[in-house]
Image (tube, rainbow, N blue to C red):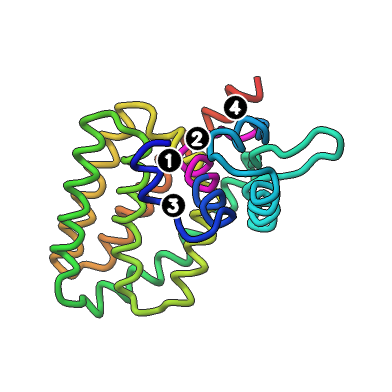
Amino acid sequence: MSSAVQKRRPQTAQQFVLEELRRAITSGELRPGGQIRQDALAARFEVSRVPLREALKALEAEGLVVHHIHRGYFVAELSLADLEEIYRIRELLESEAVRMAVRRMPDGVVAALERVQREVEQAADAGDVPAMAAANRRFHFTLVEASGMPRLVRLIATLWDSTDAYRSLYYTEDSHRKQAVREHRAVISAVRHGDEDATVRWLDEHRAHAVAALRRVLDLERD
């Protein structure tokens, strides 16, 4: 087992498997619609089937995997309508969080955004899709958490969890990574100037570009 995996390993086998499976799904390593082969994963994680089954049940409750009788577990798929609905709800909730964050402007929020943005750009330049997706999430949540509205942040996080695997598909293309970098820079500039309308507008464009690209991906997969 790699040292990176060992460092991530928490106290119990079930927690460990749950974290590793969630990471594999949200990073796109396990793709939407793909079958989860329990024997191979039990060997990979060096655990018995018991904690693996418990972790899969937890992920099923979260909506990240689905179970088909006589077929097993599969990574959950979203229809185009599902994806568009989730992004629309995100737009409504994130706009409120971002406006509040810009009004409050906690000390250090711009510096924190710039720091995470450097991670985004390093991952984008390296073509490291999992690192790009993870840094992108940290960027957005640095901003929404500055709203000081933890319940709203938790709702937004649930929506992000359900689409993380698709976000990774978006970042496989270099042009999409570069576009995200430009949009993030514009967001930082708007936040720095205390312009909540511009911040919301740039984030709306950012989401719209992702939805348009994912619409094309899903249309191709359906064909």
Please provide percent x and percent y for residue 81.
Answer: 64, 44
Please provide percent x and percent y for residue 149.
Answer: 40, 78
Q: Secondary structure at mark 4?
A: helix
The residue positioned 65% from the left and 19% from the top of the image is 223
Which residue in the structure is indicated by mark 1?
Answer: 210
- Amino acid on which disc 1 is placed: Ala
State how far apart marks 3 and 2 are (Cα): 33 Å
Indicate which disc, 4 or 1, sits on the residue closer to the N terminus. 1
State how far apart marks 3 and 1 are (Cα): 32 Å
Marks 1 and 2 close (CB-CB < 8 Å) = yes
- Taking the image as shown, residue 64 lies to the left or right of residue 112, namely right
- Amino acid on which disc 4 is placed: Asp
Which residue in the structure is indicated by mark 4?
Answer: 219
Q: Which label is found at residue 9?
A: 3
State how far apart marks 2 and 4 are (Cα): 8 Å
Marks 3 and 4 close (CB-CB < 8 Å) = no
Q: Secondary structure at mark 1?
A: helix
Please provide percent x and percent y for residue 79.
Answer: 65, 40
Indicate which disc, 3 or 1, sits on the residue closer to the N terminus. 3
Indicate which disc, 2 or 4, sits on the residue closer to the N terminus. 2
State how far apart marks 4 and 1 are (Cα): 14 Å
The residue positioned 64% from the left and 42% from the top of the image is 78
Please provide percent x and percent y for residue 54.
Answer: 68, 54
Q: Which label is found at residue 71?
A: none
